[in-house]
Amino acid sequence: MWVPLLAGVAVLAVVLSGALIASRGRTSPDVATNPRPEPPPVQASVTTPPPPLTGDDRLLSKRITGFGPGRKTITWLQNCAKATWPEGQVRARSVLRCEVITGRPATSAYAITFADSSALDAFLAAQSAGVDDSGKGDCAKKEGFNSLVGWTSSEGVPIGRLLCRRAGPAYRLAWSFENDAFVDANGVPFAIIADGPDPAALIEWWKKTPV
């Protein structure tokens, strides 16, 4: 009676042992058919260079960064690149965005050469909507920061107009060059527009800039 029972136990042990060995030799179907995906390769960042300067761009850039004898230069604006005015269409021959290299009330500024005097007038009219143009509140005289007035060189030569106003969370200065001795290299009026967070620092910086 005990012999058949022991024989059955031995057979069962052999079967279980074989099943265990077989299971160890097999690979999980999930691992075999669905391997863990490789992470995607890291893409190197590519910086798109600005478009090349056109003839009008080069004339404005030369006027700003170093023009010939008899013309003043604005040497604190450098590395000017072709740009688009971000606040809508303007009738312009050239729009540049330049780095400010002296002082830091503004880190960059736009320079715009206009198609003609009427295009400059239209630009300043749009920029000065709601601004006091009566001559009061002159920001150059620290009478506020909401005005459109004429401005002169340190020698008293009339050059153009100076606009001071809020521009969203920032403060904006825009000043034009309309005198024949100060227009761009092509004899066309232009303006510079700079924004900064501190109106007092912005106007003090502007007063020290050569024209």
Image (tube, rainbow, N blue to C red):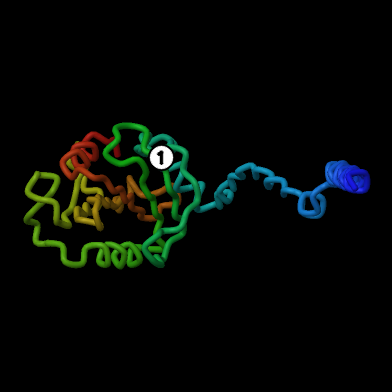
Q: Quadrant of residue 46?
A: top right
Secondary structure at numbered mark 1? strand
Q: Report x, y in % for residue 158.
A: 21, 48
Q: Report x, y in % for residue 47.
A: 58, 44
Residue 131 visible in this rendered orientation of the protein: yes
Task: Name the residue located 36 percent from the left edge and 53 percent from the top edge.
Answer: 190
Side of 164 where 180 appears, left or right: right
Task: Name the residue located 25 percent from the left edge and 57 percent from the top edge.
Answer: 167
Name the quadrant of the C terminus.
top left
Location of residue 136 with respect to 199 vertically, above or below: below
Q: Amino acid at mark 1?
A: Glu
Question: How many marks do you count on the picture?
Answer: 1
Q: Dot 1 surroundings within 10 Å: few (below 14), some, or many (20 or more)? A: some
Q: Report x, y in % for residue 140.
A: 14, 45
Location of residue 188 with respect to 46 vertically, above or below: below
Task: Name the residue located 31 percent from the left edge and 51 percent from the top edge.
Answer: 193
Q: What residue would you read off at disc 1?
A: 99
Residue 155 visible in this rendered orientation of the protein: no
Q: Report x, y in % for residue 137.
A: 8, 53
